[in-house]
Image (cartoon, helix red, strand yellow):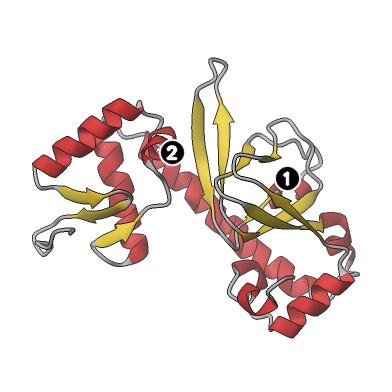
Amino acid sequence: MLNYGKMTSYPIFKGFSAKDIECFVAASSVRVSAFGRGDILLREGDECRKMGIIIEGSCTGETFSESGRREITAYLGEGSVFGDVLAMSERGISPVTVTALTEVSVMYIPFEKLLSGQCLNSAALLKNLAAIISDKYFGLLFRVNCLSKPTLREKILFYLHEMRLEYGAATFSIPFDRSALADFLSADRSALSRELSRLKKEGVIDYYKNTFILRDNKTKNKLL
């Protein structure tokens, strides 16, 4: 059963009440699908004509080189939207693979029906969608800037600096384990682990699992 109250916190439903969302769902021919960890929700090269909203769990957007190397292009948590830009494109062919990191539930909305105006509150939802697409642009710009750094050390520090700014605190958690972080930074996992250990030994960072401290002159605390 959908938790409409929780869904009011999703960016796509900004300004909606729980009752608004319930009415939208009832009038919009939405479909809810469940996936297990590791399942593929959308495969690179697939045609996509519907927008997916993650209502439980998390996923990654991934690309694969000809040699089979994985690169993570995006992290998709609860409330995230995928397939939106594809559904608006004439071509509509996915350049990425969306894979479940955990057990996932997705609510699919047929984009053509949304644009037809038949859906209740479709104008408000499209306005929110425009803001989400704008945020995705800046997310892609962030990754490009991260990958443009000449050394792995600089990539790591740039990524952690941006995550600290996002959280607004010196201590923060990242959404990736070591393997996924290496894929996001387009780096070898062993090299990433060595560089993280080196930065920790130098006192630049501290970490425990996926929780980090990026130190500056004001940050002297340590993780337990």
Residue nearer the viewer, 206 or 12: 206
Mark 2: give few (<14), some (14-19) or many (20+) Cα within 10 Å. Answer: some
Which mark is drawn over residue 171? Answer: none
The answer to whether residue 147 is visible is yes
| Residue 92 found in image quarter | top right
Q: Position of residue 114 (x, y in %)?
A: 83, 63
Position of 210 relative to 121 (above/below): above
In the image, taking residue 143 as reference, residue 47 lies left or right, namely: right
Q: Position of residue 104 (x, y in %)?
A: 64, 53
In the image, taking residue 216 as reference, residue 69 lies left or right, namely: right
Q: Do the residues under discs 1 and 2 have CB atoms within 8 angstroms?
A: no
Label 1 to label 2: alpha-carbon separation: 24 Å
Residue nearer the viewer, 12 or 179: 179
Position of 25 relative to 50 (above/below): below
Q: Position of residue 201 (x, y in %)?
A: 10, 41
For the C terminus, which image quadrant? Answer: bottom left
Q: Secondary structure at mark 1?
A: helix
Q: Of the two numbered discs 1 and 2 on the same chain, state the one appearing first in sequence.
A: 1
Q: Position of residue 47 (x, y in %)?
A: 79, 37
| Residue 169 found in image quarter | bottom left
Q: Residue at x 21, y 33 (%)?
A: 195
Q: Residue at x 37, y 53 (%)?
A: 174
For the N terminus, which image quadrant? Answer: bottom right
Which mark is drawn over residue 86? Answer: 1
Task: Please name the amino acid that badge 2 sits on.
Answer: Ala
In the image, taking residue 201 as reference, residue 11 lies left or right, namely: right
Q: Residue at x 61, y 41 (%)?
A: 99
Residue under label 2, please give it: 180
Q: Secondary structure at mark 2?
A: helix
Q: Residue at x 90, y 63 (%)?
A: 116
